[in-house]
């Protein structure tokens, strides 16, 4: 199976979604070689390079262009679908609300972290809130599967979109190795 993971939303200074995406990619990259993983990433973030593994191919895009939201939108809506065709991708995973509207037969999986762009729009830049709301709506209608990071996120989504066509799963964030009990006395 060929999976394209769109990591272009991941910032160099990772927090929240970036940490989620980086850790998920690390785990996916360590899976058996029956999974071919294509990582679409910005070229200024070396932590998104998993190319040393035989089943992973990193596709780099210029960050100085595609870190700008309108250009990243064009990347997602035009270039990503071309990559899907070119590499015969089976599944596209978008870890940050949005998805390519056309995917030429590839299944689309989207992670929904929360519904704050709807429930608390004052905490978002107006342009980003508008963008997220449109793509959360599109995910409800076009995605083949939705991953929610909590039951709360799923409930908030269902309260707004009670009739959506996709499969959904609640998959909680994992625990990093950095968070383990110190068993030695001080």
Image (spheres, grey):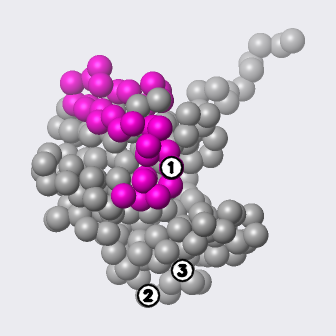
> Which element type, helix, strand or loop, lies under badge 3?
helix
Q: Residues within 10 Å of mark 2 (few under 14, many from 20)?
A: few
Give 113 or 126, whichever is nearer the viewer.
126
Q: Which residues are magenta?
A: 45-74
Give the quarter of the image for residue 25.
top left
- Vertical relation: 70 (above or below) 58: below
How far apart are the alpha carbons under marks 2 and 1? Answer: 33 Å
Is residue 177 toward the left or the right of residue 7 in the image?
Answer: right
Of residues 164 and 47, the one nearer the viewer is: 47
Nearest-to-viewer mark from 2 and 1: 1
Give me the disc on residue 158.
Answer: 3
Which residue occupies the foreground of this view, 182 or 150?
A: 150
The residue drawn where x is 23% and y is 57% is 81
Q: Position of residue 95 (x, y in %)?
A: 45, 53
Find the residue positioned furthest to the right.
186
The residue identified by callout 1 is 68
> Which residue is tagged 2?
163
Residue 157 falls inside the magenta stretch: no
Residue at x-position 41% and y-position 75%: 138
The answer to whether any part of residue 45 appears in the image is yes
- Quadrant location, the C terminus: top right
Real-space Cα separation, disc 2 to disc 3, in angstroms: 8 Å
Left or right relative to 185: residue 175: left
Distance (Cα) linking label 1 and label 3: 31 Å
Q: Cβ–Cβ below 8 Å for labels 2 and 3?
A: no
**What is the total number of numbered labels drawn onto the structure image?**
3
């Amino acid at each position: 199976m060929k999976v394209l993971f769109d990591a272009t939303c991941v910032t160099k200074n990772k927090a929240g979604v970036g940490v989620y995406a980086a850790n998920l990619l690390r785990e996916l990259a360590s899976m058996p070689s029956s999974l071919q993983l294509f990582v679409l990433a910005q070229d200024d973030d070396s932590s998104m390079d998993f190319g040393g593994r035989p089943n992973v191919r990193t596709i780099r895009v210029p960050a100085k262009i595609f870190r700008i939201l309108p250009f990243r939108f064009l990347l997602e809506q035009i270039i990503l679908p071309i990559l899907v065709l070119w590499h015969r991708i089976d599944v596209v995973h978008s870890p940050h609300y949005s998805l390519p509207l056309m995917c030429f037969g590839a299944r689309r999986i989207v992670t929904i972290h929360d519904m704050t762009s709807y429930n608390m729009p004052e905490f978002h830049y107006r342009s980003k809130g508008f963008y997220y709301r449109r793509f959360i709506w599109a995910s409800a209608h076009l995605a083949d599967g939705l991953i929610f990071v909590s039951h709360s996120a799923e409930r908030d989504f269902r309260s707004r979109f009670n009739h959506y066509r996709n499969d959904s799963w609640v998959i909680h964030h994992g625990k990093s190795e950095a968070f383990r009990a110190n068993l030695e006395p001080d």
